Image (cartoon, coloured by chain):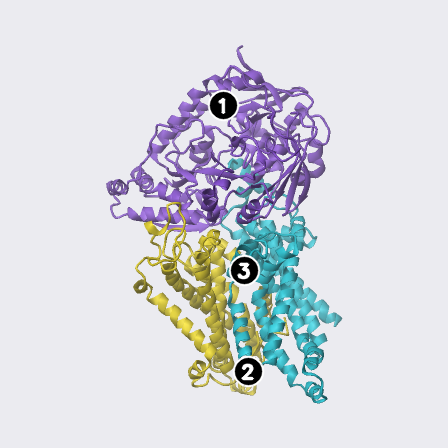
Chain colours: A purple, B cyan, C yellow
């Protein structure tokens, strides 16, 4: 039986298409070690439990405290083994076997084994954990029984020996390696989880490059260097202090005074021009793409959005350039669901160009020459109500009177999850940032039939069974060598979706990270697509001896 | 006194239970689903239902409320849906910041309000009196978020006298507590003025003046203490007004108190935190009223306990 | 519950004296208040004639190329907001929202408060004590939190916001009406009515309510100021009046991220809220002095 045997060398080589590459993520030899930095956030850090945390600011904090079997090369979307040393995929794409790295220790000093990997994933699937990540593991054999609490652990996960673990799947799953890299599959030590129970999230113990030093609720979280980190030479910093509850505007002023190193919430809108007009500050801004798309959903169950012409008309009516201007040009106009930095983005697809006259004509063809009245739901935090009003004005120009319903995030999500709840929703502030850099992540929950259920996230309730089939086909292409073929298949799916136009994609947000002058490391570390806002493990400061 | 106290304490407890019932009912009626917030955007319907069952959110309203009340009576405020920590811990971690803010506000409003009232009473009928009363009205009519933003703009952004936000030192405390204090200072000024005018009419003040004591001495040694007494009981009642403002002021200044905690919880339907903060605030208000009612007759024998 | 501050002094047995208005205009502060109110009402009513823009009109030249609002200039007298709309226009139309909420919400609150207070004060017994215990309970509610929860339960519209504010704001009125009614009910002339067999409703409407009119007028005026502030606060938190309907509170909400670079976006609507609330307070206070001299200087 032929298997794809992938050693760390080969994995990197395959993914990169290069003949030689580093065996694992290696520290930058020019980096300086030592020193500490301060990062600020406005919102609370809710939890640092990898099974629970799903906010954008604790997402990468968790990545520095814990490790998974897989990770990404810093600053890229390229998969590399992390706690795994190598892995093997069976030819049918249904069995993944990982060989673990030797001598990896938890922060409490105990050595990590394959048992811990199994325990960690069993824990996420166990309904009592109430993990938001449970569903990511649905392709593993025995998931259903475990997820319903009928079985003790997922039967498809086997510990072969202390350093080998095997996953049997019910179907070929090309995204499985990504799943092994998301936080929910990060490895936790059983004894500590049992010791702290539900408070593990406030007392995290992992294998990561940093360990938790101090946590003053609502004020600060301090990370300390893990001296015993398996990847020698990492991390470069001795401590990272996260200061919580700081308004972005305060954070920026403190940065300008040299008191902090990175404002975690970015540059506040009102100060953006000022920063960009100052060459000294502009030089410290790093711009990068983000795996994000902001879109307007149109509920295909609610007339007149059941008419494809109406949906297309809306696509043409929205002046995306102006909407982007409303947020200080900190985004690029979008024409399809996938963001440009996502593999599978259709570069030659042009989408619906802004053309109010054509939109009006289409509306007339659909039988709405006089327009109609509808509701546009939006989350009630700035800038979303403003963006919605921008869209509202564009729609008014072709005769659509959209009344804005600005509600708390949870209420908008609730309305979107009802079959005939919300005719239109502006997704900003809620959806969608990819969980992992794979084109499939923009389909299943938000455009596939699986998400078009009560309480789901497919707010347009668009369900095309043929595309669902094509998506399943694409995801069964597991061979890393056929990645291009798979990306093409996904491209086609999204272009097809745009013909039916259940969404009007509006823009893809750009990231602008501002750093203090002392921060070192490549620019891509500061707009890392996975570690947001920066890759804590790899950045360093220049002013240490 | 004892029987009065115990009756009032029982009343207060009933009030708190009533507030818990109303808040719980309102949160039960929310169109947003807390379970979906916990389960996140990638959850399957099965996951959602399982979480709903485990949290008991599939139960009828009365069962859910009964359970909450039972735990509450045992001192258990439950666990946050999103943070998964004990609500009591989360509140305890942030309460000191809120209490500090309120303390600062009380000091400021007494300083400003009493001074204004005193000066107005002494200069009664003059232009000073009139302008001070106009100022007190402006204070009463100013929305807190506008006061906060303007103070920030003038004293932090333009003049850089104070930090723009944050927590930790005395200079961080000044602008937020001043913002909270503005509204009540107006009330205190007006009360102090009328209280002082009453006192100045009393015979003993006239006697003291007649004995040839210096005007300032009479004012400060004799009139002031008596005029302030009835106002002290007001501080208890003031807690309610102060509590009302914390959500707004803490969010303007990024103050890490329970106002920010509850505001974040409201955004994410974290019901146990909303319940907890509402009850803690209501408790503070009830306690303040109780203290005011106990102190008042001690200060002014004309007021009798009902 | 509290026996210190409730303005429970003697009820006034006199009807509103003739010439109250005349007395009002002779007080400089009240006159200032009335002038402000007239200006705001005129601004709201004549808004379409005072400006060339529509309140929801996002003017193409109203923003710089990088999406920043314009400072006050010859075209946009008070500058533009973050969507390129004329701020003056929005403030003028926003006055309609504030006045609407001020009158409707406060009207409902006044009706609820008066009903509960009068019924509780007249009937005493178990009805009275149930109603007053409920009022005590509402007094102890953190008002803004209650309003936020109520606003979250219903989908906000202008009427819902008014209703939410009314549900939070009736309590003070109820307490005042209660104390006044209960001391009125002990008066001899009410007793006399009772002995000749007048029905409860008849006594309430014909003999008690008229005596409460001065108090209702005073509290009605002062209450408008409270409602205007509460509406502004709810809109400032993003849970009040829905965009693009302008309200002074949501103008600040939408623009506050820019307040350092563009302070006028907070300053002008802020001053408008302050001025209107102040005006009703000044007039209300003067009315209290004129109609209800026993309550002078009370909170």
User: Are dots 2 and 1 on a single chain?
Assistant: no
Q: Closer to the camera: disc 1 or disc 3?
A: 3
Does A286 sit above or below residue B145?
A: above
Q: Badge 2: few (under 14), some or many (20 or more) residues near its Cα, within 10 Å?
A: few
Instruction: Indicate the position of residue C117 as horizontal and vertical percent values.
Output: 54, 73
Vertical arrangement, residue B286 with respect to residue A504, above or below: below
Residue beneath label 2, please?
B125
In the structure shown, which secondary structural element does the residue marked by tag 3 occupy? helix
Tell me the element at label 1.
Answer: loop
- Residue B273 at x, y percent in the picture: 60, 50
Number of marks in the image?
3
User: Residue B133: horizontal and vertical position, in percent?
Assistant: 54, 75
Name the one closer to the observer, A27 or C16: A27
Q: Is residue B135 above or below residue A424?
A: below
Question: From the viewer's perspective, is the residue at label 2 or at label 1 nearer?
Answer: 2
Residue visible at 35% across and 33% down? Answer: A498
Where, quadrant-wise, is the N terminus of chain B in this rendering?
bottom right
Left/right placement of residue A306 relative to residue C299 reads left
Q: Is residue B23 visible to the viewer in this orientation of the structure?
A: yes
Residue in front for this viewpoint, B193 or C130: B193
- Tag of residue B151: 3
Report, in whole angstroms, how far the alpha carbon at label 1 lies from the one at label 3.
Answer: 56 Å
Assess disc 3: are there few (<14), some (14-19) or many (≥20) residues with their C-alpha within 10 Å of its C-alpha. Answer: some
The reply to the same-chain question for discs 2 and 3 is: yes
Instruction: Report how far apart the C-alphas of labels 2 and 1 lie in the structure.
Output: 85 Å
Q: Position of residue C81 (x, y in %)?
A: 40, 54
Image quadrant holding the C terminus of chain B, namely: bottom right
Q: Chain of mark 3?
A: B
Residue, x 70% and y 83% (percent of image)? Answer: B214
Q: Which residue is mark 1?
A: A174
The alpha-carbon separation of the residues under discs 2 and 3 comes to 31 Å
């Amino acid at each position: 039986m032929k298997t794809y045997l992938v050693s760390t060398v080969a994995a990197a080589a395959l993914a990169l298409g290069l003949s030689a590459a580093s065996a694992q993520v290696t520290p930058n030899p020019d980096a300086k070690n030592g020193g500490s930095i301060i990062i600020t956030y406005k919102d609370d850090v809710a939890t640092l439990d990898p099974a629970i945390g799903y906010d954008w600011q604790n997402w990468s904090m968790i990545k520095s405290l814990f490790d998974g079997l897989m990770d990404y090369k810093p600053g890229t979307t390229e998969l590399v083994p992390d706690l795994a040393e190598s892995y093997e995929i069976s030819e049918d794409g249904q069995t993944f076997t990982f060989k673990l790295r030797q001598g990896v220790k938890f922060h409490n000093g105990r050595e990590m084994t394959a048992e811990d990997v199994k325990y960690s994933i069993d824990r996420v699937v166990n309904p009592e954990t109430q993990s938001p990540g449970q569903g990511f593991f649905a392709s593993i054999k025995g998931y259903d029984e475990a997820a319903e609490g009928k079985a003790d652990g997922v039967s498809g996960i086997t510990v072969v020996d202390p350093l080998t673990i095997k996953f049997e799947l019910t179907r070929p799953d090309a995204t499985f390696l990504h799943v092994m890299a998301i936080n929910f599959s990060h490895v936790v030590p059983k004894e500590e989880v049992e010791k702290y129970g539900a408070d593990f999230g406030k007392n995290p113990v992992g294998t990561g490059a940093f360990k938790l030093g101090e946590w003053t609720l609502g004020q600060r979280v301090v990370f300390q260097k893990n001296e015993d980190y398996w990847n020698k030479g990492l991390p470069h910093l001795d401590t990272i202090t996260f200061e919580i509850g700081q308004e972005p505007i305060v954070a920026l002023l403190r940065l300008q005074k040299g008191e902090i190193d990175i404002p975690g919430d970015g540059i506040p809108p009102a100060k953006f021009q000022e920063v960009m007009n100052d060459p000294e500050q502009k030089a410290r801004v790093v711009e990068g793409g983000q795996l994000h798309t902001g879109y307007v959903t149109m509920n295909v169950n609610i007339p007149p959005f059941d008419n494809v012409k109406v949906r297309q008309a809306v696509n043409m009516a929205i002046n995306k350039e102006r909407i982007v201007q409303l947020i200080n040009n900190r985004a690029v106009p979008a024409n399809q669901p996938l963001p440009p930095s996502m593999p599978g983005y259709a570069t030659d697809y042009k989408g619906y160009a802004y053309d109010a006259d054509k939109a009006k004509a289409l509306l007339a063809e659909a039988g709405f020459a006089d327009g109609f009245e509808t509701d546009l739901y939006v989350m009630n935090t700035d800038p979303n109500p403003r963006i919605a009003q921008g869209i509202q004005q564009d729609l008014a120009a072709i005769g659509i009177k959209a009344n804005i319903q600005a509600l708390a995030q949870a209420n908008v999500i609730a309305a979107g999850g009802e079959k005939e709840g919300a005719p239109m929703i502006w997704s900003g502030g809620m959806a969608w940032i990819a969980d992992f850099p794979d084109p499939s992540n923009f389909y299943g929950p938000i455009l596939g039939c699986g998400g078009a259920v009560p309480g789901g996230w497919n707010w347009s309730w668009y369900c095309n069974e043929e595309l669902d089939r094509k998506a399943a086909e694409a995801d069964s292409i597991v061979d890393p060598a056929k990645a291009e073929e798979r990306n093409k298949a996904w491209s086609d799916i999204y272009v097809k979706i745009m013909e039916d136009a259940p969404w009007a994609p509006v823009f893809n947000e750009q990231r602008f990270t501002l750093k203090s002058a002392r921060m070192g490391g490549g620019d891509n570390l500061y707009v890392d697509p996975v570690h947001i806002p920066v890759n804590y493990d790899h950045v360093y400061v220049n002013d240490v001896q | 006194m004892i029987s009065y106290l115990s009756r009032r304490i029982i009343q207060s407890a009933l009030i708190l239970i009533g507030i818990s019932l109303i808040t719980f009912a309102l949160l039960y009626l929310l169109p947003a689903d807390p379970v979906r917030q916990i389960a996140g955007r990638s959850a399957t319907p099965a996951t959602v239902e399982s979480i709903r069952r485990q949290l008991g959110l599939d139960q009828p309203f009365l069962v859910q409320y009964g359970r909450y009340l039972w735990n509450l009576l045992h001192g258990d405020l439950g666990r946050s849906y999103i943070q998964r920590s004990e609500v009591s811990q989360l509140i305890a971690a942030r309460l000191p910041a809120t209490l500090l803010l309120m303390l600062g506000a009380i000091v400021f409003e007494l300083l400003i309000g009493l001074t204004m009232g005193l000066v107005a009473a002494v200069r009664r009928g003059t232009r000073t009196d009139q302008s001070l009363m106009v100022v007190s009205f402006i204070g009463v009519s100013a929305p807190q978020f506008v006061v906060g933003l303007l103070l920030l703009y003038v004293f932090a952004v333009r003049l850089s006298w104070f930090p723009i936000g944050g927590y930790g030192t005395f200079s961080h405390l000044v602008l937020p507590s001043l913002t909270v204090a503005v509204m009540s200072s107006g009330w205190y000024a007006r009360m102090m003025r009328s209280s002082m005018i009453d006192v100045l009419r009393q015979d003993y003040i006239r006697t003291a003046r007649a004995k040839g004591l210096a005007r300032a001495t009479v004012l400060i040694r004799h009139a002031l203490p008596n005029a302030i007494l009835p106002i002290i009981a007001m501080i208890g009642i003031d807690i309610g007004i102060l509590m009302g403002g914390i959500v707004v002021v803490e969010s303007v200044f990024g103050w890490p108190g329970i106002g920010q905690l509850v505001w974040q919880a409201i955004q994410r339907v974290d019901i146990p935190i909303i319940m907890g903060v509402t009850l803690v605030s209501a408790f503070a208000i009830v306690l303040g009223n109780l203290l005011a009612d106990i102190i008042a007759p001690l200060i002014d024998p004309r007021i009798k306990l009902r | 519950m509290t026996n210190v501050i409730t303005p429970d002094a003697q009820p006034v047995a006199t009807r509103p004296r003739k010439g109250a208005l005349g007395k009002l205009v002779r007080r400089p502060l009240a006159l200032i208040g009335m002038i402000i109110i007239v200006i705001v009402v005129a601004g709201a009513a004549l808004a379409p004639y005072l400006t060339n823009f529509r309140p929801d009109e996002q003017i193409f030249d109203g923003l710089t190329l990088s999406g920043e609002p314009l400072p006050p200039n010859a075209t946009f007298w008070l500058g533009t907001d973050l969507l390129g709309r004329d701020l003056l226009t929005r403030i003028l139309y926003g006055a309609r929202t504030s006045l609407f909420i001020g009158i409707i919400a406060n009207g409902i609150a006044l009706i609820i408060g008066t009903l509960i207070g009068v019924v509780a004060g007249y009937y005493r017994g178990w009805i009275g004590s149930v109603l007053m215990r409920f009022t005590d309970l509402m007094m102890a509610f953190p008002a803004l939190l209650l309003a936020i929860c109520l606003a979250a339960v219903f989908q906000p519209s202008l009427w819902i916001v008014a209703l939410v504010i009314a549900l939070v704001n009736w309590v003070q009125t109820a307490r005042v009406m209660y104390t006044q009614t209960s001391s009125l009910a002990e008066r001899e002339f009410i007793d006399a009515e009772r002995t000749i067999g007048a029905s409860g409703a008849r006594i309430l409407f014909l003999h008690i309510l008229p005596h409460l009119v001065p108090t209702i007028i005073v509290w009605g005026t002062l209450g408008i100021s409270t409602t205007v502030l509460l509406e502004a606060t709810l809109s400032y938190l993003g849970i009040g009046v829905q965009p693009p309907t302008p309200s002074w509170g949501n103008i600040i909400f939408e623009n506050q991220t820019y307040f350092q670079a563009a302070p006028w976006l907070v300053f002008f609507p802020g001053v408008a809220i302050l001025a209107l609330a102040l005006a009703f307070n000044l007039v209300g206070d003067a009315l209290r002095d004129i109609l209800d001299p026993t309550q002078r200087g009370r909170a």
